[in-house]
Image (cartoon, grey):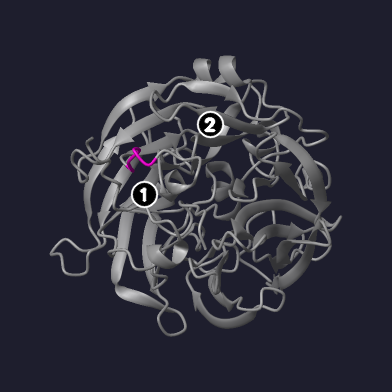
Amino acid sequence: MIPIKLDPTFYPSPKLAMKAPREKLAYVACLYEGTGVDKNDFIAVIDVDEKSPTYSKIIGKVEMPYKGDELHHFGWNACSSSLCPNGNPALERRYLVVPGLRSSRIYIIDVKTNPVKPKIVKIVEPKEVIERSGYSRLHTVHCGPNGIYISALGNSEGEGPGGILVLDHFTFDVLGKWEMDRGDQYFAYDFWWNLPNEVMVTSEWGVPNTIENGLKLEDLKEGYGNRIHFWDLHKRRKIQSLTLGEENRMALELRPFHDPTKLMGFVNIVVSTKDLSSSVWLWYYEDKKWNAEKVIEIPAEKSEGNLPEILKPFKMIPPLVTDIDLSLDDKYLYVSCWGTGEVRKYDVSNPFKPVLIGKVKIGGIGSGKTGGPQMLEISRDGKRIYVTNSLYSTWDNQFYPEGIRGWMIKLNSEEGLSQDKDFFVDFGEARAHQVRLSGGDASSDSYCYP
């Protein structure tokens, strides 16, 4: 019998994953949609090895063969979930699964053969996605123990409901729609899970027709979601929904605790229609039901001038919390305020009472700088946070009408929070979004062992 050689980047628990070797490469989704530049999107390869002579440089890229994909959130074909009891340990973290948010096209990119020169090995065309699942506008990728899951914002007509489709682990064929009974769930966005307890959690942004052409204030009341949904992962049916405040809109990033014995996690609310504040909510299981409460609130800031048209009536700069990320030890939550230009670090050792222990200012609306902190990615050891500045092409243009020049910075988190002055990646006219770290990061793997 020939023994199976396990992928060394897979770890049964988050505690063991924190001891993994340090990342040496970062893969970044770069796009030209909304910039006026007639070029194809690409995945950039960044050297993040401090000992390397090309540290903080773009050392490779793979260009997409079509224009207008708008690359967004992408993920791995396989990860530590393969070590779960129902997983397949013969899989390896070899491919990046990269969807186009506008095109609904999926690229399968090999980063093992030559990590610095990734290669597209398969393209799943939008026709297959729509015909087999009924979904379009693909958003988030997660590697499950029995397939590759991808969320979608809506259908081919740009309306809802949005949901989740599944790809085969080996062929990357679209298997179909994941949901068996969705109840009244209509809006979709992010999703993640607690695998041992067979719980799926999903969140809400909006449907393509209220998102793609930019934010309209008249749509805020009913055109964007404010609920999270809990599902039986095995039966694929919704079991409960929670509304996160009637005045709140856009419940986006879900960050379950990495320790699978903890049935809880965080979700961010982008904006309150009451006062333009942002908030972070803790969702948790107690007394045989799901509950949620607001644990962080970040107020809007007054401003008398230099505001984009969409904000001039308010004379305020909203924080616009558009991403959050949780360290693998479940101790620190990082919050990006794309509007006010801050990255905040909270100690969430007591998740019901987060404590702000650090923050860094990087641009922001009205600052005269190019964009603000948006996507966050934490290294597995929790010491480094990589930050990019693009949200979504049409929304970029509304809130930063002077234009966004894509960048990536690195924050150090060993003592408080500080910016690494030796690390800055300039993507030029391309805008930078999702970051994935070689070997895994804090938002790509899920674990079945505490």
Q: What stretch is highlighted in magenta?
A: 89-93
Q: Tell me, yes or no, if residue 379 can be seen here.
A: no
Callout 2 amino acid: Arg
Q: Which image quarter: residue 96?
A: top left
Residue 187 pos. (x, y %)? 73, 38
Q: Distance from label 1 to label 2 (Cα)?
A: 18 Å
Question: Which label number is shown at residue 102?
Answer: 2
Question: Which label number is shown at residue 69?
Answer: none
Mark 1 or mark 2, whichever is nearer to me: 1
| Side (left or right) of 281 relative to 245 | left
Outermost residue on the front side: it is 1
Q: How crowded is mark 1: few (under 14 residues within 10 Å), some or many (20 or more)?
A: many
Callout 1 amino acid: Val
Query: Where 241 falls versus 337 (above or below)?
Result: above
| Side (left or right) of 298 relative to 100 | right
Outermost residue on the left side: it is 53
